[in-house]
Image (tube, rainbow, N blue to C red):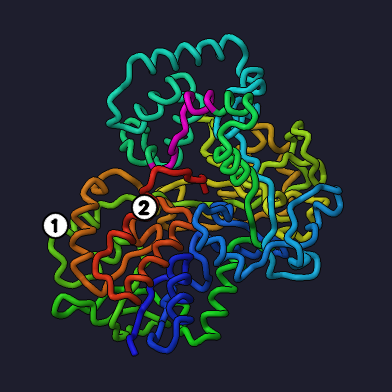
């Protein structure tokens, strides 16, 4: 029996654990999780009877393996959810599926609404050149944006920065309105300092030209049937009744029931190496250092920390690893009586709140990056969804900087003050309760020594029994489904004795639709 040690109990680590443990008695699987929770940044936090999402995770994938896997653990609803039932809204139901009012392990079908909040007006996200956009911008700015795009199309810039990448596709005016401020908040650097690689991965196929072609297709019924399918997929998404953490808690419980040894509070400090192989994993638990022997290691821990924990790693590899940049994350949950935002969408909601899951804040005057409205992810995330609104304010910072080190009271005061300045809240008196969460290494960034990532990958692949999976394990801005697929591929290689690891590293490099998470 082979001892397989999995570092991290996020989507990649738990997917690998379950796939290995259910394949038979050939593997002894141990999962080492640093925190006391499952799901990584896909976890759900419970606070005073309400639940908050860390980062927001739509359950959407073009990979049938992933969707079948989700269905196995959480079948699609067969009866209306609470808000649909109260409002009389129609929602796709699966014949014979569970009733979310009486069953907890159930996946809901939710409507995808995300918009940009700019100068106290809502714009579609992704940007669409429709009547609403033109009305909100006004004729003068619309003409300016059009001329700006034509100028950019006539004089393409070298795509040596994220700024040039966006300007080539949208023109300078729309770039300055809808991309520049948010991108700088997210990464802590101006887009001119960031590689175009990030845009190429996250904005696949999106441009003014693509938007105009989309409009033409919609005016020509019967054309582009495949396009219709993809559009329908991204207008709705699946979501666990109690948030994404519920899924991963369920996966962990079932993996443990099948025999996986899942240990919480285990801080991995390094690997034991010999003869070009990983022989064990060192970790601290309850103040004690331990080493567990390993035949195979699957790592979803930050590749930066992994490399620095390998004894004898070449100085050049340590330099590259140490220089890999990350962006950290703080979310502030506010329970409020109401929002001052008017619902003018025609979409019915409890309390007639705006129907958005996310609101992207394009305002350089505030540090706030996004607003989540948990009511719209699932009404079951709230204790009282009919009379309160539970929102998450997303801030991007760097571990150790002055913002990261702010106390919870300071974060709550900042978030409340910014919402009042934006016209989202009437005043501090609207806040009924609040909670703050910090997340380290939430976003692997594509600058600094990331340009040398291929060298680091080649060196890591030299350890035949080491597999790097997941967002932080590969230092790639993977969505949840991509992280799961890296685990599927790693398990396949282990089972089939495949030595090459290109199939694992190549996940999420294809030029296909990439739903923003």
Can the viewer see residue 415 in this picture?
no
State yes or no: residue 203 in magenta. Answer: yes
Q: Quadrant of the N terminus?
A: bottom left
Residue 180 in the image, given as x and y percentages of width and height: 44, 30
| Disc 2: which residue | 476
State which region is magenta: 201-213
Q: Is residue 304 above or below residue 499?
A: above
How many residues crowd mark 2 within 10 Å: few (<14), some (14–19), many (20+)?
A: many
For the residues bearing labels 2 and 1, Cβ distance under 8 angstroms: no
How many residues crowd mark 1 within 10 Å: few (<14), some (14–19), many (20+)?
A: few
Q: CA distance from mark 2 to mark 1?
A: 21 Å
Residue drawn at (75%, 44%) of the image: 430
Residue drawn at (60%, 70%) of the image: 72
| Disc 1: which residue | 316
Residue 90 in the image, given as x and y percentages of width and height: 80, 48
SS for dot 2:
loop
In terms of depth relative to the viewer, which is nearer, 516 or 489? 489
Residue drawn at (55%, 56%) of the image: 54
Can the viewer see residue 142 in this picture?
yes
Name the quadrant containing residue 198: top left
State yes or no: residue 397 in magenta. Answer: no
């Amino acid at each position: 029996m082979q001892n397989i040690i999995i570092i991290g109990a996020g989507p990649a680590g738990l997917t690998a654990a379950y796939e290995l443990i259910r394949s038979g008695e050939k593997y002894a699987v141990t999962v080492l999780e640093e925190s006391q929770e499952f799901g990584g940044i896909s976890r759900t936090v419970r606070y005073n009877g309400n639940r908050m999402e860390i980062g927001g995770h739509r359950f959407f994938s073009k990979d049938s393996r992933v969707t079948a896997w989700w269905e196995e653990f959480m079948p699609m609803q067969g009866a209306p959810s609470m808000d649909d039932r109260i409002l009389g809204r129609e929602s796709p139901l699966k014949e014979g599926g569970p009733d979310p009012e009486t069953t907890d392990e159930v996946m809901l079908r939710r409507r995808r609404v995300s918009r940009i909040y700019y100068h106290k007006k809502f714009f579609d996200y992704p940007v669409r050149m429709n009547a609403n956009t033109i009305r909100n911008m006004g004729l003068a700015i619309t003409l300016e944006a059009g001329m700006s795009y034509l100028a950019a199309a006539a004089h393409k810039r070298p795509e040596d920065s994220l700024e040039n990448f966006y300007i080539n596709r949208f023109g300078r005016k729309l770039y300055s309105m809808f991309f520049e401020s948010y991108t700088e908040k997210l990464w802590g650097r101006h887009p001119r300092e960031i590689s175009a690689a990030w845009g190429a991965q996250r904005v696949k196929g999106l441009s003014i030209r693509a938007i105009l072609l989309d409009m033409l297709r919609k005016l020509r019924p019967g054309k582009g049937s495949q396009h219709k399918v993809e559009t329908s997929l991204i207008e709705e998404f699946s979501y666990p009744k109690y948030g994404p953490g519920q899924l991963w808690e369920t996966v962990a419980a079932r993996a443990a029931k099948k025999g996986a040894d899942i240990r919480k509070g285990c801080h991995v400090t390094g690997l034991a190496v010999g003869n070009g192989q990983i022989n064990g994993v060192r970790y601290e638990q309850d103040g004690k250092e331990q080493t567990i022997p390993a035949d195979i290691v699957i790592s979803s821990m930050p590749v930066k920390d992994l490399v620095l924990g390998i004894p004898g790693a070449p100085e050049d590899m340590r330099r590259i690893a140490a220089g890999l940049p990350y962006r950290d994350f703080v979310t502030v949950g506010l329970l409020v009586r109401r929002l001052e935002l008017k619902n003018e969408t025609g979409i019915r909601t409890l309390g007639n709140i705006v129907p958005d899951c996310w609101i992207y804040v394009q305002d350089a005057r505030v540090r706030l990056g996004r607003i989540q409205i948990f009511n719209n992810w699932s009404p079951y995330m709230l204790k009282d969804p009919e009379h309160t609104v539970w929102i998450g304010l997303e801030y991007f910072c760097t571990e150790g900087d002055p913002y990261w080190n702010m106390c919870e009271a300071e974060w709550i005061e900042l978030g409340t003050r910014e919402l009042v300045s934006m016209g989202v809240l009437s005043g501090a008196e609207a806040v009924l309760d609040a909670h703050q969460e910090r997340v380290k290494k939430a976003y692997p960034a594509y600058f600094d020594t990331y340009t040398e990532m291929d060298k680091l990958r080649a060196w890591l692949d030299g350890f035949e029994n080491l597999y790097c999976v997941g967002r932080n394990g590969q230092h790639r801005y993977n969505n949840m489904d991509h992280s799961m697929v890296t685990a599927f591929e790693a398990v396949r290689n282990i089972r089939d004795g495949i030595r090459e690891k290109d199939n694992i590293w190549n996940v999420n490099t294809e030029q296909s639709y990439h739903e923003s998470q």
